[in-house]
Image (cartoon, grey):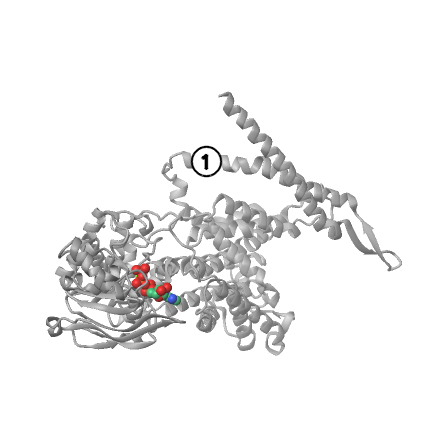
Amino acid sequence: MANISQTNVVVSNNLMARALREAFYAGLVALGLFVLFVGLKTDQNILNELVLVQRWGLLAIFVAIAMVGRFLTVAYIRPWFEARKAAKAAAPTVEREAGFVARNFSLLALIALVIYPPVMVALFGFQGSLKWVDNFGIQILIYVMLAWGLNIVVGLAGLLDLGYVAFYAVGAYSYALLSSYLGLSFWLLLPIAGVLAAAWGTILGFPVLRLKGDYLAIVTLAFGEIIRLVLINWTEVTKGTFGISGIAKASVFGIWSFDVSAANNFAKVFGLPMSSAYYKIFLFYLALALCMLAAFVTIRLRRMPIGRAWEALREDEIACRSLGINTVTTKLTAFATGAMFGGIAGSFFAVRQGFVSPESFVFLESAIILAIVVLGGMGSLVGIAVAATVMIGGTELLREMDFLKQIFGPEFTPELYRMLIFGLAMIVVMVWKPRGFVGSREPTAFLRERKSVSGSFTKEGHG
Amino acid sequence: MALETDTMTKDPILKVEHLSMRFGGLMAINDLSFEAYRGDITALIGPNGAGKTTVFNCVTGFYKPTMGMITMRQKAGKEYLLERMSDYEVNRDAKVARTFQNIRLFSGLTVLENLLVAQHNKLMLASGYTILGLLGFPTYKAAVGESIERAKYWLDKANLTDRADDPAGDLPYGAQRRLEIARAMCTGPEFLCLDEPAAGLNPRESLALNELLRGIRKDTDTSILLIEHDMSVVMEISDHVVVLEYGQKISDGNPDFVKHDPKVIAAYLGVEDVEVEEVIEQIAEITPGDTH
Ligand SMILES: Nc1ncnc2c1ncn2[C@@H]1O[C@H](COP(=O)(O)OP(=O)(O)OP(=O)(O)O)[C@@H](O)[C@H]1O
Ligand SMILES: [Mg+2]
């Protein structure tokens, strides 16, 4: 007994010593890294001369944070995680009966979404609800659709696509250009944008799908950039960085319009006071309907032979070929289907903004959409929808955090920190749930009972 | 090279002629010719690195041979030159299925799903390349029912019915081997290539495997080409044995003939050709007749 406690003391002494040592090194590294970035700053004085501002106090704070952080990590946080892991491994895994909410999550979420706009109107009035319906509701739904589209490529077929935003751009610009040059209506352009994006997906797919894994990822990334640069530089058609504005609004199947001047304006027809809220609410329900359609198609596709082939491709491409599956066309269909979803989301984005410019289609967008898919759990529609809500809703919420200004001073703009928080949140989620919110996979067919497949058996795919 | 004359009258399903495969400076297969006969279990044996898996990869289209011709003759008489076809066409059109030396299952899909993926081409057609299926056409539903029946049949044969809804990666090793064979059979092959199906199995699993292979032989008209190290398995279930060493055929005939071929004995004991005579004498002294 005494022996054991003695060794424990030795171990903890060792740990403390190591923690202090590592904290010291971390401090050194931080000092080296930040001395030129933080410690010294070039500035202009009133005479427009370049002066060197010394900020040793700030540098000391940075170094102190690094040292304390490293110390806490080594001395406390890491042992705590290890202890927890050991405890988890020791405890037997008990299957918990899912609660009412968990079992009916999709249905409850759908009901909540359907009553969301009226509730917002009731709470904040027509004008006040705009922000909640548009910035939160519609924006999140667009990302849900985008992420569901990418999910087919990455989550089901296991092809890492870093240039997905290209198809979003193709959809948005298809709508913007065809509507402003040819005056085609939204309802016609929605499927056209989807088809055009799918066509681009196929065109890209042909040369690219011979590549695998990292190479595929890099080439798709390049494709995303090419599309964006074409949009910037083909000024005669796309108006370059100015973007295309004044994009026609959608109408309710051509029956009621939302143009203020039109005779069949929705508000006029029903004798309602003028407000832009009707249009936003209409768009919200439209986005919801499109998302439901996308979900329906995805669920059906998973049970089709093509959907199973996608997942089989993710699991083992060589085995697929040994079973007579043409993997090239299978990959192409995954690419095209994903691109089609992206294109539809893009045209919806254009109609919501009334304005598109290449700035909306930077690589960061691809990264965010991919992050949503990974966070949600590759392949899971519900998980991805939750992840989109958390990520997009969360960053939007940061705009609302005005009270933070009182704490950090009036110059503090919380949305500037959104990428920082975004990154931290991702790390936390990935440590806590490495397979995303929903890590298990629902089988597409069963003989006796439907058992979900634990994430430890599914693979991520290698391109 | 000793060829038996009585096998010449049989109907060859697979004919390999002057097959060579070179990897850089290494001649993995050197001018190999052999035939596999319809309805037989043909065993391809040889020491490690002899080139057996390479032969399989050439036959199933995964490697393009440097030289040679591989002809598959289907029951209906249609002939396919396998060396000209890509890997998936070899399965889809020529009806040659295979398993892998290191098991390749879709581990995240359930056992049943594995067997359904194997029926992809048939189901794809029935679903009108997905479009009719998406619209819920009854032809597709009927085809799915049929596929599940077929999967059930093979689940039963492979003794996996109880595990049908479990992920394939969760099965024990022997069951994974059987599932891989069942999955290959679900593609409806005329010719089945098995790469060391008994490797690493315990005696009980080995027995279950032999059962499955015999079932295939008895109840279907699928011919089998089998790579195997375990001599007891080879001698027990195969009708015809081809022995490879350093990419060349050193013996070809029925199991009894091969078992007593001095070249085979030498190859398996790993001696130089010049010492063969010596070894045979030694063996004759120790175990007259049986070499195992
Ligand atoms: N893709 C390849 N590239 C280069 N060399 C290869 C390749 N595949 C096989 N070889 C070489 O060809 C030779 C034959 O290999 P093969 O895998 O066919 O042997 P095997 O008879 O199946 O052996 P084992 O009993 O160990 O499975 C070996 O020397 C191997 O290193
Ligand atoms: Mg081998």
The amino acid type found where label 1 is placed reads: Ala
Residue A306 in view (yes/no)? no
Task: Using residue A228 as the reference point, say whether residue A385 is left or right of it.
Answer: left
Count up the numbered dots: 1
Q: Position of residue A124 (x, y in %)?
A: 58, 47
Closer to us: B99 or B256? B256
Question: Badge 1 is on which residue?
Answer: A86
State the SS at label 1: helix
Task: Using residue B96 as the reference point, say whether residue A439 is left or right of it.
Answer: right
Closer to us: B10 or A118? B10
Q: Residues within 10 Å of mark 1 (few under 14, many from 20)?
A: few
* Residue A61 placement: quadrant: top right
Closer to us: B124 or B205? B205
State whether residue A10 is above or below residue B241: above
Please report the residue visible at 54 percent of the width from the left and 36 percent of the height from the top.
A79
Task: Give the residue at the far bottom of this rendering.
Answer: A236
Please report the residue visible at 22 percent of the width from the left and 61 percent of the height from the top.
B278
State whether residue B192 is above or below residue A183: above
* Residue A319 placement: quadrant: bottom left
Q: Position of residue A226 (x, y in %)?
A: 56, 71
Residue B110 in view (yes/no)? yes
Q: Is mark 1 within 8 Å of ligand 1?
A: no
Task: Give the residue at the far right of this rendering.
Answer: A47
Q: Position of residue B257 (x, y in %)?
A: 14, 64
Q: Quadrant of the C terminus of chain B?
A: bottom left
State whether residue A77 is above or below residue A426: above
Q: Position of residue A51 (x, y in %)?
A: 84, 55
